[in-house]
Image (tube, rainbow, N blue to C red):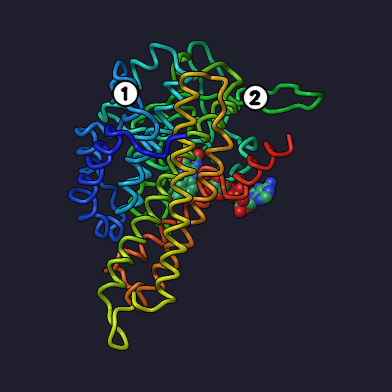
Amino acid sequence: MDFTLSKEHDMVRTLFKDFAENEVKPLAQEIDEQHRFPRETVDKMAKYGFMGIPVPKEYGGQGADTLAYAMCVEELSKVCGTTGVIVSAHTSLCIDPILTFGTEEQKQKYVVPLAKGEKLGAFGLTEPGAGTDAQGQQTKAVLDGDEWVLNGSKCFITNGKEADVYVIFAVTGKVEKRGRIMKEISAFIVEKGTPGFTFGTKENKMGICASSTYELIFTDCRIPKENLLGAQGKGFNIAMHTLDGGRIGIASQALGLAEGALETTINYVKERKQFGKAIGAFQNTQFQLADMATKVEAAKMLVYKAARKKDEYKKDPKVSYSVEAAMAKLYAAEVAMEVTTKCVQLHGGYGYIKEYDVERMMRDAKITEIYEGTSEVQRMVISAALLK
Ligand SMILES: Cc1cc2nc3c(=O)[nH]c(=O)nc-3n(C[C@H](O)[C@H](O)[C@H](O)COP(=O)(O)OP(=O)(O)OC[C@H]3O[C@@H](n4cnc5c(N)ncnc54)[C@H](O)[C@@H]3O)c2cc1C
């Protein structure tokens, strides 16, 4: 067991940290208030290679490991939760399933421009009637000659409208499993601009306000037959596998938010004086900081462990990182919520004011307990493995 980071990891972390401080932090408050997608930051991240960190070089990526990718999302999220999730949804939810399940043609056509950051990616699974119960989806895809015809809608899609490439799930028929009739779900790659593919409601959210969350609408949307991703009927497995990886991204986002809020608060309590001394001199403040730092460190270990396990899977597909990813996401999200809430408290009235970053971090932290599987879902995944 090795808890130390390699020199390479230390070096890339410095690169991510400098970029976050110089390019992301100055915009974080403004884009949050304006609910404006930070396209200029995405363009800069493409230049630095941040949009394809764990993608092999032959597919346009950086050829780095999952841990380096997790550290990128973590460093971005320390200063801006929105920027963290843009990279995470693009990499984990769009590139990863095409890289894992796509044909060579699909990888050349889609992964290469996505990994280079020339295109942005998104993932459409959720529907109004199918959130936690992802099998409940209604969107249909019917094969008609050489084309699949999609009808239905998806809601709450991160990078919606801004993204060029969408991994979409739809019902392609019915199958009998253990005497029960079940929906057959398949995965597809759909490009923005395809006739019949439009965008509906833009969500007005509590946090990650600059992230673009849209409804996707498919009305007789025809896509080429070869845009089926993986085998027909394997869509649910593809979605679940993809979310296992995505959870490492969201866990990294949550970790970054907790670390960012804690760092900001440590600086604040050293400066702010009441009763003639810094509020950091009160034991209540000190003990709260100690508890928070301990939980953040524990979260970090779980997140890095899950990232390393995903890298083991890359070498040996029999390795599962599902439970590690669920534990990391569950714990890091709950730590992010607890830490950011306490950090607002330690800022007193100033913590409630938008000028001080901690209120934004607290709003951003809440979503990490909900998307890519709620905390309840993570508990189901973990307990199912315990009781197997
Ligand atoms: C900002 C944002 C971005 C998102 N981005 C994406 C995206 O890019 N792509 C995508 O496909 N989806 C996305 N989602 C959707 C997100 O993953 C779902 O909202 C989430 O999975 C929960 O589904 P739901 O909202 O339908 O809640 P529900 O499933 O209705 O759940 C409501 C509550 O009931 C609980 N619950 C449900 N079933 C059970 C059960 N069996 N046992 C115990 N408790 C249960 C849940 O844990 C939750 O607390 C996003 C959502 C938001 C808000």
Q: Quadrant of residue 14?
A: top left
Res. 201 in view: yes
| Label disc, if present, on residue 164 of the rendered structure | none
Rendered location of residue 369, percent (x, y)? 52, 52
Percent across and percent down for residue 124 are 48, 35
Which residue appears farthest toward the front when viewing the image?
Answer: 1
User: Where is mark 2, residue-wise?
Assistant: 184
Is 2 above or below relative to 254?
A: above
Q: Please say if 333 is above or below 172.
A: below
In the rendered image, which quarter is residue 183 located in? top right
Question: Which percent across, then down, holds residue 149?
Answer: 51, 23
Task: For label 2, count other residues whose C-alpha is less than 10 Å away and answer few (under 14), some (14-19) or many (20+).
Answer: some
- Return the x and y of residue 252 as percentages of the image width and height: 41, 44
CA gap, disc 2 and disc 1: 35 Å
Mark 2 C-beta to ligand 1 under 8 Å:
no
Q: Given the current orientation, which residue lies at the most extreme bottom position?
A: 275
Which residue, given by chain and number where applicable, does mark 1 sit on?
A: 63
Residue at the image point whose x is 38% and y is 35% from the top = 67
Foreground mark, 2 or 1, reads 1
At mark 2, the secondary structure is strand
Disc on the earlier residue, 2 or 1: 1
- Residue 215 appears anywhere in the view: no
> Which of 228/56 is in front?
56
Left or right side of 155 for 85: left
Kindly identify the residue that appears in the image at 47 percent across and 49 percent down: 299
Q: How many marks?
A: 2
Residues under numbered marks 2 and 1 in contact, where contact means CB atoms less than 8 Å apart: no
Mark 1 beta carbon near ligand 1 (under 8 Å)? no
The residue that appears at 64% across and 35% down in the rendered structure is: 135
Amino acid type at circle 1 is: Gly
* Element marked by disc 1: loop
